[in-house]
Image (cartoon, rainbow, N blue to C red):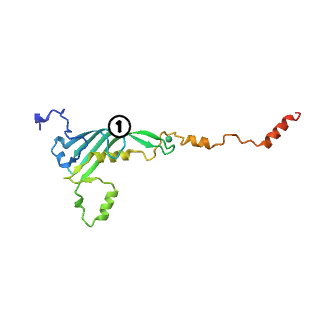
């Protein structure tokens, strides 16, 4: 238990290049079966102003992986009301369970069952497979993008066009104007 060679905690747990595939079996060989991956990368498929920053913790718990992430990213979104582009900061803080199961464990006749499980969005990978931090983080960030995109909660929409659409002259009925003139001429 008290092996002195394992005491210094200063040794960074992540000796891997950032966001490379992590073989699940490799997690079993590191102390605490826990790996921290520092993230400072642009993710394929996700346009961000700056590299996504944060970290992912992978914890092998026998039958499943516990994956946590704290990360921030700034994405450019289009406002639903005024159509302008604006920057949105995503602050991700999430934990997910990924079951370690062979896909072949499901019987060949269980296509329907398999479909239902996929609909449930149960994440699973093979115990002998690899975890893809970049793909996982990409999915988490996409889920964190708000479904309604507004540059501002009080966004008034497309202002310029509604102003242009309004008539520039007040509508005056000349017959009433003549009547008003006549009224002024009458002795009070
Ligand atoms: Zn807007």
Residue 155 location (% of width, % of height): 52, 40
Q: Looking at the image, which residue sits at the far bottom?
A: 109
Between 20 and 12, the one lying in front of the other is 20
Location of residue 158 with respect to 4 vertically, above or below: below
Residue 44 location (% of width, % of height): 32, 45
Residue located 41% across and 41% down the image: 76
Q: In the rendered view, does 123 fall on the left or right side of 34?
A: right
Residue 166 location (% of width, % of height): 64, 43
Residue 173 location (% of width, % of height): 76, 43
Location of residue 11 with respect to 77 vertically, above or below: above
Q: In the rendered view, does 145 fall on the left or right side of 62?
A: right
Query: Which class describes the residues within 10 Å of circle 1: few (<14), some (14-19), or many (20+)?
Result: few
Between 93 and 128, the one lying in front of the other is 128
SS at mark 1 in the image: loop
Numbered disc total? 1
Q: Looking at the image, which residue sits at the far right?
A: 187
Residue located 28% across and 43% down the image: 68
Q: In the rendered view, does 174 fall on the left or right side of 41?
A: right
Image quarter (top left, top right, bottom left or bottom right) of the C terminus: top right
Tell me the quarter of the picture where residue 106 sits. Answer: bottom left
Residue located 66% across and 42% down the image: 167
Q: CB of residue at label 1: within 8 Å of ligand 1? A: no
Image quarter (top left, top right, bottom left or bottom right) of the N terminus: top left
Residue on which disc 1 sits: 50
């Amino acid at each position: 238990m008290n092996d002195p060679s394992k005491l210094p905690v200063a040794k960074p747990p992540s000796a891997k290049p950032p966001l490379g595939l992590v073989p699940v079996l490799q997690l079993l060989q590191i102390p605490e079966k826990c790996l921290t991956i520092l993230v400072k990368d642009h993710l394929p498929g996700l346009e961000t102003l700056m590299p996504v920053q944060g970290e992912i913790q992978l914890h092998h718990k026998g039958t499943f992986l516990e994956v946590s992430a704290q990360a921030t990213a700034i994405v450019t979104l289009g406002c639903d009301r005024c159509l302008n582009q604006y920057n949105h900061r995503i602050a991700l803080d999430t934990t997910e369970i990924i079951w370690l199961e062979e896909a072949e464990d499901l019987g060949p006749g269980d296509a329907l069952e398999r479909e239902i499980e996929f609909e449930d969005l149960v994440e699973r990978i093979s115990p002998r497979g690899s975890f893809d931090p970049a793909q996982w983080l990409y999915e988490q960030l996409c889920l964190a993008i708000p479904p309604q995109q507004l540059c501002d909660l009080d966004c008034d929409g497309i202002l310029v066009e509604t102003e242009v659409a309004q008539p520039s002259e007040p509508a005056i009925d000349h017959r009433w104007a003549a009547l008003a003139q006549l009224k002024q001429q009458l002795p009070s």
